[in-house]
Amino acid sequence: MEGTLSATKGKNRLLKIWLYLLIFLLPLFFVPSLFDAYNLPKIALLLGGMLVGWLIFLGEKFFKKEKVNLFFPRWFWPALALVVVFALSSLFTPTAATKINALSGKTAIILGGFLLAFLLAQLPKANPQLPATISALVLALVLIGQYLGVLKKWFSWPFLENKVWSPTGSIFSALVFVLASLVYLLAIVVRHFRSQGKLTWQPFAALAAMVVLVLGLVLGGINLVEAKPVLLSPQVAWVVAVENFKTWQSAFFGAGPGNFSQAYTRFRPAAVNATSFWNALFPSSFNEYLNLLTEVGLLGLGAFLFLLFKVFRKGFKSLPPAFIFLSLAGLFLPFDLVLWMLFFVLLGEVRGEKASSRSYSPQIAFIPLLALVALGWWYGRLLGADAVFARSLEAFNRGEGGNAYNLQIKALEKNPYQDFYHLAYANTNLALANAFSQQENLSDQDKQQVSILIQQAIREGKAAAAVNP
């Protein structure tokens, strides 16, 4: 019996270390050599981390007939319903390419976040806000470094010239992430001094960390204001969401996860054309609630609101203050991958008195684990294609048109479902055709090559439209 308890404690300790490392890395992880340097590697890290995490949790019981205890918090079924709605909404998108992109994009984020929150709920003494706060401190230091201009002196990455750059991929999400950690530390300090207990080092460490976070918020905020970002107005966002109700399918399931820009292009009011941002393309709505209504419809927004209802119905005192803050922040800005992950990390801390624990055969996890393996294989192809595509753009910028041409063919072979791959390949064909046509004394073979390149450019333009109508 003691050996079993010791093994369980060891497994839980290993799982906690793994999850803490994953939570710390997710906001900071990016791969500069990729075209999509932020979202793609973060999603791959999340899904791979969940596969390893659940295998650690199940352990040797997965290969035996021993049962495993699963703890079901009160938010489990609404959160699962949210995952299901995202999956169904992805399947209702018009083409095979949009289905694949939705399933491997936003839906994969929600699935990975749900599995992360559910796994955190199995660890009764976990404090996932601690690694998130350490990650926020690093982000704050990055924001400070960007304001002072010191990072570009240490690293030769060209994107560091952009003062609103952040490892999260968006300075908005970086500022909100830092602010959520500030709320967490402030709650620790207030709780400690209200307890009137013996002074310890913890509140003073929290106060020191808060100084760094506040400085990062202020300087990052100054950089953001100076950049003068173009923001979507709530009125336009509401019109786009409501116009999506023209059919029952789009009303209940939306335009598809990650497809807000398509809905905006179709349904934006004509008055936008008279503004200075008439040609701007917004990837998300004004806030997360309107974004859910547009992308996953009434069912998606309803599932999310029901999830919040199940969490908040027992009152605010039992909830992490940062979770309350993030839920309110969703009224003023949309969530990207980093903020969704923070939402699910905080959700994993919410347990509740009426939550249940049941014993199951670990083989029930076979299908979810198989789905993670399949997604991992697919993301391996996506990462490979993105790396090749990034190399093709570098070759094109160096004037190596032929090399760029061949690399883009390889990228399309690995992932034919990205519209901008097809558009880039079309532009490369046009550039090569133009270069050939400028030569003097063209041979018949050269003229034929120019004709072939132009035909391929037209074909790839049509392919891009087919991938993303």
Image: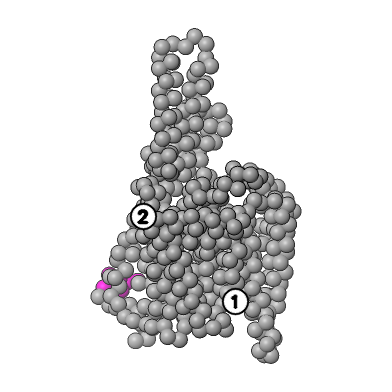
Between discs 1 and 2, the one toward the N terminus: 2
With respect to residue 78, does 378 lie above or below? Answer: above
Q: Which amino acid does label 1 sit on?
A: Pro
Q: Magenta residues, as a range?
A: 59-64
Q: Which of marks 1 and 2 is in front?
A: 2
Give the quadrant of the C terminus: top left
- Choose top left, top right, bottom left or bottom right for residue 446: top left
Q: Residue at x 37, y 86 (%)?
A: 2
Q: Where is residue 253 in the image (x, y as percent from the top left)?
A: 40, 59
Q: Residue 116 carries which label?
A: none
Q: Which residue is drawn at 36% across and 60% down?
A: 88
Q: Which mark is residue 92?
A: 2
User: What crowding class fits label 2: few (fewer than 14 Cα within 10 Å), some (14-19), or many (20 or more)?
Assistant: some
Q: Residue at x 64, y 67 (%)?
A: 179
User: What crowding class fits label 1: few (fewer than 14 Cα within 10 Å), some (14-19), or many (20 or more)?
Assistant: some
Foreground of the two, 12 or 264? 264
- The residue identified by callout 1 is 321
* Cβ atoms under marks 1 and 2 closer than 8 Å: no
- Choose top left, top right, bottom left or bottom right for residue 63: bottom left
* Helix, strand or loop status at disc 2: loop
Whether the magenta-drawn stretch holds residue 328 is answered as no
Foreground of the two, 282 or 119? 282
* Helix, strand or loop status at disc 1: helix
Q: Where is residue 156 in the image (x, y as percent from the top left)?
A: 64, 44
Give the quadrant of the N terminus: bottom left
Q: What residue type is labelled 2?
A: Phe
